Amino acid sequence: MTDDVLIQNGRIVTAVDDYVADLLVRDGQIEAIARHIDPSPTMQVHDASGLLVLPGGIDVHTHMEFDLGDAQTVDTYETGTRAAAFGGTTTILDFALQGHGQSPKHALDQRLALAEPQACVDFGFHVILTDINPGSLSELPDLINADGVSSFKMFMAYPGVLMVSDGDIFRSMRAVGAHGGMINLHAENGEVIQVLIEEALAQGNTSPKFHALTRPRIMEAEATHRAIRLAELAEVPVYMVHLSAKEALDSVVEARDRGIPAFAETCPHYLFLSIEDYDRPGFEAAKYVMTPPLREHECQHALWRGLRFDDLQIVSTDHCPFCFNENPHGLNKSKQMGLGNFERIPNGAPGVEFRLPLLFDGGVNQGRLTLNRFVQLTSTAPAKMFGMFPRKGAIAVGSDADLVLFDPNQPQTLSASTHHSLVDYTLYEGFHLLGKVAKVFLRGQMIVNGDEWLGQAGMGRYQRRAASGRIL
């Protein structure tokens, strides 16, 4: 039993509301919201005058301690979730990767055992399916109904490693659809891209820029269209991860206009960075090697418009951190693995800590997003899409007291020297933003106070989720 927490005078902003009130937290949940609540001597009282009170951020796409062939991301579940907390994110959805010959259930149990002692914020998992057979398909209903995993990721890229066939995607869609499951798809035409990669290398084109040049927008668009048509036939919702290309977004818009439950997320790096970052000198461009790659400026404009008008539903980070330098964490956690061959550069970039301030400054402050839409994209829609609402993603009586006190007038400069991830760089080095997280509460317990860490490893709880893609 902890003391009650009283947050006074804050401007409470949800996906639909915007008002000044006091908020009482008891036993980890929101107990009351009123114009004024009298404090008692035993309460922890926080004055939120001049601050926004937001529901804790939910990042539905992270890769902590993730093995990608012979490379592994540098953030542990402890360091990655602590960085998330400093950025105002109180729940993440990470991935359990089914290895070939392994059952999906075993993959989930392995990740749970790894994450539970470490996680500093609440967490759940998508299961990545790579080995589709009658045995693995038969496990999926129980994963949804008993384990609370209602979303399954599959790859249309990386042939011979992660890629699965259209037939297996379709089989999986039908296996989960009746139970409230949803398939998340990495949509690129992997076989055609592999031809382009082999041609580039044969011509001696080995620099990081060719990672982008061999993964053209039209191949993301083709796979997105194909994925949606498969879901349409299977009669299940489908969710496109890390959408980057205008042409792929066009396919989502067309499907949604026809009433198809097709959804998509994008990531901050596609909103704030562009293909021009691959022109950086030497190997520096390797920092920006993620998949899909950064796109042209016209794609940025299309993505912002998509966020504004709900053609895109969520902003996640795809936090997949590999160091730029080999030391101190080793070559297998470094971009240096791909020196001399862009195909060997570990694909992925960091970002879990900067999602909220980037979107607030670049979205709200620049007039691209309303405050309510900002909350919808970063918290409420993720909670609804992936079966956690109204426990998460809401400021309402009975909801978990995952709360962010955000100072809209506090400037900050983003830098790897002050962030909390183990990765040795940030894509946004030197970005000057207006707006900063002041305090963060996880189920009523303050875990971030300015630059001070008050949380602890293992305090994050596993989230069993209801149906995905059914509540919008």
Image (cartoon, rainbow, N blue to C red):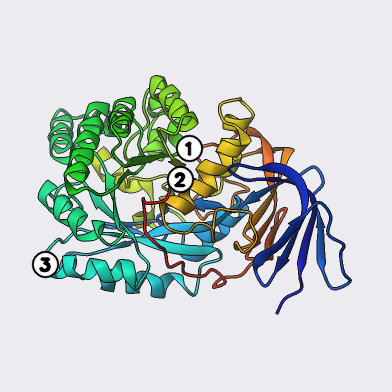
Q: What is the distance, in whole Å, between disc 2 and disc 1 at their CAs?
A: 6 Å
* Residue at (40% x, 19% y) in the render: 298
Q: Which residue is mark 1?
A: 268
Q: What is the distance, in whole Å, between disc 2 and disc 3 at their CAs?
A: 33 Å
Q: Which residue is mark 2?
A: 317
- What is the three-letter code of the residue carrying label 2? Thr
Q: Position of residue 70 (x, y in %)?
A: 27, 57
Residue 391 in the image: above or below residue 269? below
The answer to which of marks 2 and 1 sits earlier in the sequence is: 1
Horizontal side of 289 relative to 227 (left or right) equals: right
Residue 279 in the image: above or below residue 70? above
**Local crowd size for mark 1, using a 10 Å CA cut-off: few (<14), some (14–19), many (≥20):** many
Horizontal side of 460 relative to 329 (left or right) equals: right
- What is the three-letter code of the residue carrying label 3? Pro
Horizontal side of 132 relative to 270 (left or right) equals: left
Please give the label number shown on residue 333: none
Residue 446 in the image: above or below residue 304? below
Q: Which residue is mark 3?
A: 134
**Local crowd size for mark 3, using a 10 Å CA cut-off: few (<14), some (14–19), many (≥20):** few
The answer to which of marks 2 and 3 sits earlier in the sequence is: 3
Q: Position of residue 62 (x, y in %)?
A: 42, 53
**Local crowd size for mark 2, using a 10 Å CA cut-off: few (<14), some (14–19), many (≥20):** many
Residue that sits furthest to the top in the current view: 298
Secondary structure under badge 1? Answer: helix
Horizontal side of 440 relative to 381 (left or right) equals: right
- What is the three-letter code of the residue carrying label 1? Pro
